[in-house]
Image: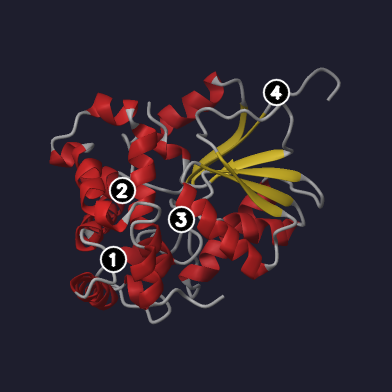
Amino acid sequence: MSKPSALDLATGLGGKIAKDDVVSAVDKYEKYHGYYGGDEEERKANYSDMVNKYYDLVTSFYEYGWGESFHFAARLKGESLKESIKRHEHFLALQLGLKPGQKVLDVGCGIGGPLREIAQFSLTSVTGLNNNEYQISRGKVLNHAAGVERTCDFVKADFMKMTFPDNHFDAVYAIEATCHAPDVAEIELGNGLPDIRLTGQCLEAVKKAGFEVIWEKDLAADSPVPWYLPLDKSHFSLSSFRLTAVGRLITKNLVKALEYVGLAPNGSQRVQDFLEKAAEGLVAGGKKDIFTPMYFFLARKPLSDGQ
């Protein structure tokens, strides 16, 4: 599938937010965050609105620069970013032990890049759970283009309030998504996070929910290539050119021009600015080894007697 063009970036900016309302949406989103004096309790109380605004504002930027799968991946030497992302998605399918015909849930699925890859790799049916209307509409377009409408679909819902019947799915996974649940300021601001948690807190929450943790690990720990490398301005890559310092400068000026001529809504530059802050914060956090998006855990329901 071809990469989104500058026109795709311009027309997608703001998602389902009316173009005239983008500036006010940016204002409201920024005010949720401590970086701009926001209140922590207000962020938690309004996490759904905050995250929805975030993804309406940034999805076209993500797809333009990163592709259809909005996540990082442990990377091998000589491996491209795109290859590492696919390998990570295959790794998840293998860890879950997926078998043809099974039903799988992707919690916080974005525009569906991982669910399409995992469904095709494992011959399963994958449902993407997402509370953002724009990302779902975009995902449906991409599902149709990939020819996977029969095995891949979407459900619009808050993952804090799921209503699926018990045992409806054979497996469930989430990739850098449940961090948006409500319960380093630049990273929070630029990634739509109410608050960042320690890995130990995540593990404890899984156990309290009644799951048995089979194994857990920061997959970035043994990765020969730093997970944050695609965002590091000192790194240059032709295969990920749009993420390099030169590529990001071109995108910044492109967005400025598109906003000036009216193709992109007012406020687009401000969205690009806080994403740039996020990139800088992520790289700094990664280099200091105080932040990782690669914490992995595999859990299951406790086995009953006889299993």
Find residue 257 and report its horizontal and vertical position in percent: 21, 76
Ranked by sequence position, the earlier of labels 2 and 1 is 1
Which residue, given by chain and number where applicable, does mark 1 sit on?
A: 232
Which one is in front, 132 or 242? 132
Ranked by sequence position, the earlier of labels 4 and 2 is 2
Which residue, given by chain and number where applicable, does mark 4 sit on?
A: 302
Circle 3 sits in a helix, a strand or a loop, which is it?
loop
Ranked by sequence position, the earlier of labels 4 and 3 is 3
Labels 3, 1: front one: 3
- Residue located 14% across and 41% down the image: 36
Circle 1 sits in a helix, a strand or a loop, which is it?
loop
Left or right: where 41 falls relative to 116: left
Which one is in front, 57 or 283? 57
Q: Amino acid at mark 1?
A: Asp
Labels 4, 2: front one: 4
- Residue located 29% across and 53% down the image: 282
Q: Is residue 123 shown to the viewer in this render?
A: yes
Which one is in front, 242 or 235? 242
